[in-house]
Amino acid sequence: MKNILFAILSGILFAISWPTYGFALFIFFAFVPLLFSEFQIRNSSSKWIKLKVFGHAYLSFFIWNLITTYWIYFSTPFGGVFAILANSLLMSTVFLLYHIVATRTGFSAASAFFISVWMIFEKIHLNWDFSWPWLNLGNVFSEYISWVQWYEYTGTFGGTLWILLCNIAIFKAILLFREFKDKGIIYRGILKVGLLILIPITISLVMFYNYEEPKKTINVVILQPNINPYTEKYNTTDTRIGELLLQLSKQSVTDSTDLVLAPETVFADGTQLPNFERSEAVFYGQQISRMKPDLSFLGGVSMFERFQDPAKVRKQSNQIRPNVNDWYDDYNSAFLVRNTIDSTQLYHKSKLVVGVENFPYQSLLKPILGDIMIDLGGTVAMKTTQENREVLRLDESLSTAPIICYESVYGEYVTGYVNNGADFLSIITNDAWWGNTQGHKQHLSYARLRAVETRRYVARSANTGISAIINARGDIIESLGYEKQGTITGKVGLSDEKTFYVKYGNYIPRIAQFLALFIFLFSVVKFKRKRP
């Protein structure tokens, strides 16, 4: 029974550390009760040890996932239940791997394996078709941005490493005290863990307070139309949307405005790609951009291209009728209209929401599950992506990253825009699917991490909120609340410098892969030698 209580305690500690309501300090010992539970089960004489370890881990991670991501249920009950159960399962499997290695090696090797394999799990969660990195440990500091200014060198994996090291250090001190009953062990442990926590925070605070604003800036107007995606968005014409955006722009655009930013798929009628230049989206984008010289408009549009040529079929193409050459590609795109140029620039969203915009492992699962795409107010088709992290140019010397919604959760992915020349980050999103819950608040909060990692300003337009301007050290300097219609007017700093993280990406989990493989092979070989 005690072990179950330890598992519950871990789950609660994870949950109450999470943004945007939690206190991040709890994360530094959230694993400890679960690690102690595993240690006691491992050293007991009970049966079904592996099953018990897995069950206790699942209980912890289920509590964490449920409390922090329950809001998915408001957009799709099936998706919410699946995400919570499946992510808890994956986390528990990682913990079971640690248990298996811990039974065959010493404390140091097992701890190193646990740290490494957890980071491998997070890296996989960033890249595979069932990608869901929302609860990657390094995200926990998004509301305590002054603690992690060194993310410009490590990305969020630096935070994951920091958290795991602290948990292991506390766990080791508890085990040593339990064995030797020496209070000096506790005092030394407190000192060691205190330094392990305080030194990175101190370094970060020095960086935080020595931050210098960029010398170059542009003036932006961010539009927040506040259109309900369930009752209005897909039942409103692009013409009516365009008139609303034009009206909002006229209220805020001045002679000094350089960019007007509108949300994801704000034009949602479904424009045919070959006719895009003659669409309502481009027409109203041009109307806004012509309000003053050198003004650009960037917004979101839903588009499709229908075709009958089998040679054009991609793995993300949607077949309209079975066994008939009648297909279409569906796009969630960003477009930019410049006053001085007739043609528009396009970028197609390429990090897709599982089950909503992407059918994972379609060739394997579709024969079993059929068409199981989740309906979010009309979004039921596989989206078509593009390879490059294309930047959109406001002029020949100024570019922005057209980051669409879910893409902003991916640190290394966003560095691709910066490596391609983005001087600032534009995030366009629609966060209304989850209602007024932690979902849209966490999504905004994670954008602050991207600002620190890349040292780029963020201009964020959210259909129903929260729209914001975030500076390059992660401070929210302007915002417009949830379910408020209006605009934000402000300055966005520009930079062409590349941080260490932008240059080298997620190098920490790449190192962890080799370490985990070495320890795992060592534990297997060592175990086989002991067998008679």
Image (cartoon, helix red, strand yellow):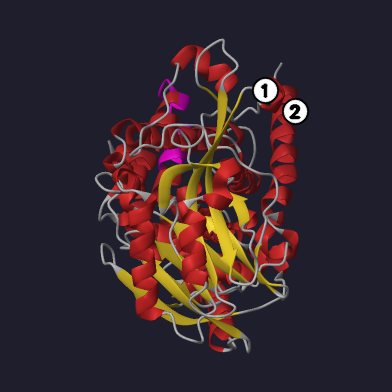
Q: Nearer the viewer, residue 109 or 144?
A: 144
Residue 283 lies in the magenta-colored region: no
The amino acid pointed to by label 2 is Val
Compared to residue 309, the image places residue 217 above or below, namely below
Q: Residue at x 51, y 32 (%)?
A: 382
Label for residue 233?
A: none
> Mark 1 or mark 2, which is nearer to you?
1
Q: Disc 2 marks which residue? A: 525
> Where is residue 21, by image quadrant?
bottom left
Compared to residue 167, the image places residue 369 above or below, namely above
Q: Nearer the viewer, residue 198 or 347?
A: 347
Q: Quadrant of the C terminus?
A: top right
Q: Residue 519: percent from the left, percent from the top?
A: 71, 39
The answer to whether residue 268 shows anywhere in this view is yes
The answer to whether residue 12 shows anywhere in this view is no
- How dense is the environment of label 1, judged by Cα within 10 Å: few (below 14), some, or many (20 and up)? few
Label 1 residue SS? loop
Q: Disc 1 marks which residue? A: 309
Compared to residue 36, the image places residue 147 above or below, namely below
Relative placement, left or right, of 526 versus 188 is: right
Q: Residue 1: percent from the left, percent from the top?
A: 27, 35
Q: Residue 232: percent from the left, percent from the top?
A: 27, 48
> Where is residue 478, by image quadrant?
bottom left
* 1 or 2: tag closer to the N-terminus: 1
